[in-house]
């Protein structure tokens, strides 16, 4: 057996590889510079162009580009009319923003448990958590795989709930032949650097509903309007505008939009490569009984954002932390997605307790996110497989 790097052996690779990384080329750089030399740095033509392209890609009717994915979720909740006293149902296996957006509106996030195989929110658990206070479901396409949209839409329709899809991971994913972004009442995207395409920061909300669209536009920029049709008073002076609601400044800059537009052109390539890497991982880890991989549902043609291995800890002599550290010593820099949201002290103080979602908690104990990004070479992929196999082999019972 090969000596582990953590015990003084030679690492499987010489340089560290990270779980995620952006891919920026000269075309991206040129696109940003072009905007910097133009007249509009914000609220300019690149924003409209980006919104049009996002509509083309997803076949949604409307897109609203915003400053980041968290702002997108906040605006979606505001447009949905989420207020004090309301309940929204979401998953604990997500980034905190998916639940925080409810708190921003004075509503209470209610955590439904996950499906132990797909790791996505369980439709049965959603149904169990619905009360008369529930107003919306925020379903997260965890790792990029679409949630069971058909069933969740059915539940939402039956109980008159709005469905907000947090698609921060799932840009490029197709569900039953339809792109994520055009299916739920609203879908949010993020363009943070670890996501499939990036603008540094950035986000968007997609919808097919003209009323929701108008609200999103208004809340994006302070609730201010220049549209005479929407004003309460008649505009007598040319400079006149009105604030008719309380909104925020959640605008995106034109140079971010230009970067995202340039990255969007590479999405098919990004998507293809991510799928190839996922397939190579799946095939390699199938042979390792100590590793469980995420179940893929046939309805989702997934552009994967994250690749998780779930350790079957009963078959191993090491803890997740020891394996994580051993991988790091091999120069494979992993992460863990996610700590259940309600574990955080802020949520504990709001009265959430451990034990709320047993499947989510069990999953959290054994997961490690391994590197997956477009820039990985075949050699990189191979080194991750060799490294994971080496460490797991060493610690197997
Ligand atoms: C990244 C992410 C967000 C937030 O996006 P930002 O652009 O970082 O604000 C929301 N939800 C999920 C699931 C995410 O991964």
Image (tube, grey):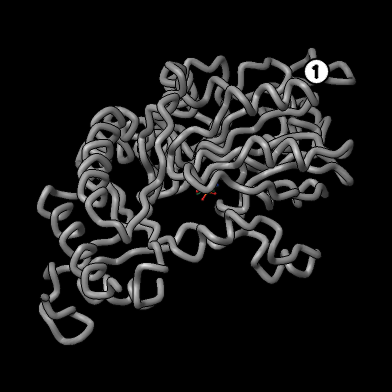
Residue labelled 1 has its Cβ within 8 Å of some atom of ligand 1: no
Residue 324 quadrant: bottom left
Residue 113 makes an appearance in the image: yes
Q: Within the image, what quadrant is residue 267 found in?
A: top left
Which one is nearer the viewer's eye here, 374 or 112? 112
Answer above or below: position of 7 versus 117.
Answer: below
- Point 40% across, 36% down: residue: 296
Q: Residues within 10 Å of mark 1 (few under 14, many from 20)?
A: few
Seen from this angle, which residue lies furthest bottom?
8
Residue 340, percent from left and from top = 59, 60
In the picture provided, is 151 more to the left or to the right than 299? right
Q: Judge left or right: residue 332 versus residue 342.
A: left
Q: Position of residue 2 (x, y in %)?
A: 11, 76
Residue at (62, 53) in percent of width and height = 92
The C terminus: image quadrant: bottom left
Disc 1: which residue:
230
- With respect to residue 392, does 305 lie above or below? above
The image shows residue 273 at horizontal and vertical percentages of 22, 37
Which quarter shows the N terminus? bottom left
SS at circle 1: loop
The residue nearer to you, when weighing 253 against 37, is 253
């Amino acid at each position: 057996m090969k000596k582990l790097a953590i015990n003084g052996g030679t690492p499987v690779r010489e340089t560290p590889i990270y779980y995620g990384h952006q891919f920026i080329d000269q075309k991206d750089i040129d696109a940003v510079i072009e905007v910097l030399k133009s007249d509009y740095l914000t609220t300019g033509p690149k924003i409209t162009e980006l919104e049009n392209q996002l509509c083309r890609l997803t076949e949604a009717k409307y897109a609203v580009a915003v400053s980041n994915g968290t702002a997108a979720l906040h605006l979606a909740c505001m447009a949905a009319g989420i207020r004090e006293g309301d309940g929204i149902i979401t998953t604990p296996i997500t980034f905190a923003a998916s639940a925080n957006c409810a708190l921003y509106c004075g509503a209470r996030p209610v955590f439904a448990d996950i499906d132990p195989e797909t790791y996505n929110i369980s439709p049965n658990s959603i149904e169990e958590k619905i009360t008369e206070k529930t107003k919306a479901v925020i379903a997260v396409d965890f790792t990029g795989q679409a949630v069971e949209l058909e069933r969740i839409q059915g539940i939402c329709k039956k109980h008159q709930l709005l469905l907000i899809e947090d698609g921060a991971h799932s840009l490029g994913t197709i569900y039953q032949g339809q792109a994520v972004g055009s299916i739920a009442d609203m879908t949010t995207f993020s363009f943070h650097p670890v996501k499939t395409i990036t603008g540094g920061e950035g986000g968007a909300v997609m919808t097919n509903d003209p009323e929701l669209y108008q609200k999103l536009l208004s809340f994006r920029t302070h609730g201010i309007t220049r549209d005479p049709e929407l004003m309460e008073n008649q505009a007598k002076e040319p400079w006149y505008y009105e604030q008719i609601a309380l909104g925020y400044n959640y605008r995106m800059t034109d140079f971010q939009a230009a970067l995202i537009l340039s990255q969007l052109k590479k999405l098919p390539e990004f998507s293809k490569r991510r799928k190839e890497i996922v397939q190579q991982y799946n095939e390699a880890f199938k042979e390792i009984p100590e590793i469980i991989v995420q179940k893929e549902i046939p309805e989702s043609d997934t552009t994967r954002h994250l690749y998780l291995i779930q350790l079957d800890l009963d078959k191993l002599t090491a803890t997740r932390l020891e394996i994580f550290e051993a991988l790091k010593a091999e120069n494979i820099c992993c992460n863990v997605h996610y700590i259940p949201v309600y574990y955080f002290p802020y949520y504990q103080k709001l009265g959430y307790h451990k034990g709320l979602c047993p499947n989510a908690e069990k999953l959290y104990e054994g997961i490690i996110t391994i590197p997956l990004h477009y820039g990985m070479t075949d050699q990189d992929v191979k080194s991750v497989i060799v490294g994971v196999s080496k460490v797991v082999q060493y610690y197997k019972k």
